[in-house]
Image: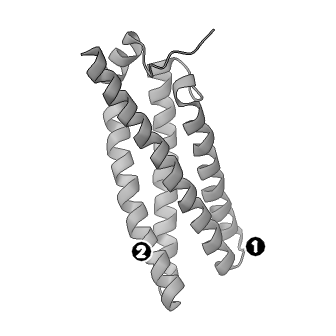
Amino acid sequence: MARSSQLYTEAQRTRRDTTMWTQVQGILALLQFVVFAISVGLVLRFLLTGEGYHIATVSIVAKTTVLYLIMITGAIWEKIVFGQWLFAPAFFWEDVFSFVVIALHTTYLFGLITGVVAAETLIVIVLAAYAAYIINAGQFLWKLRMARLQSQVVA
């Protein structure tokens, strides 16, 4: 059976537009980006000057916390809109890549908490995590654009 190019059926669009989780996702996405931007600045400061490791670490943990929160609430949103917790066909690849992002952030946290990974290596891990986050955010922005275009056609 061929997949429709439409992201949402009419029923899914209605559920998307009426659930509070859509607004929660928008707020958390913006919050995550702000925390990310601040953290990138602090990580770059550490890389360039060797100073501020502690505050950079706090910012990375904050970014990771928001990431976990947006993933949990995103799964709730996906369940309400599409009827499954994750990997709905319309967002399959975004969810797959989200797990790459989460795996990198979790690897960072594991190394930080256990102390088995050197600070320099932790920074490399977080840079990979942040690069993956940028790609993943781009995927979601593309889907947001596609949803808006679809809404214009429907209207």
User: Which label is found at residue 30?
Assistant: none
Secondary-structure class at tag 1: loop
Q: Earlier in the sequence, mark 1 or mark 2?
A: 2
- In this rendering, does residue 20 appear at all? no
Residue at image coords 49%, 76%: 43
Q: Where is residue 57 in the image (x, y as percent from the top left)?
A: 52, 73
Dot 1 corresponds to which residue? 116
Question: Crowdedness of circle 2 by 10 Å Cα count: few (<14), some, many (20+)?
Answer: few
- In the foreground, 106 or 26: 26
**How many dots with numbers?**
2
Q: Which of 110 and 134 is in front in this view?
A: 134
76 with respect to 153 (left or right): right
Q: Is residue 138 visible?
A: yes
Nearest the eye: 112 or 146:
146
Please provide percent x and percent y for residue 115.
71, 74
Question: Residue 37 falls in which quadrant of the image?
Answer: bottom left
Give the quarter of the figure containing the C terminus: top left
Inter-mark Cα distance, 1 to 2: 25 Å
User: In the rendered view, would you say 115 is above or below 45?
Assistant: above
Q: Which amino acid does label 1 sit on?
A: Val
Hey, what amino acid is under mark 2? Gly
Q: In which quarter of the image is residue 13?
A: top left
Element assignment for label 2: helix
Which quadrant is the N terminus positioned in?
top right
Identify the residue at image location x=33%, y=15%: 14
The residue tagged 2 is 41
**Left or right, residue 151 beside residue 98:** left
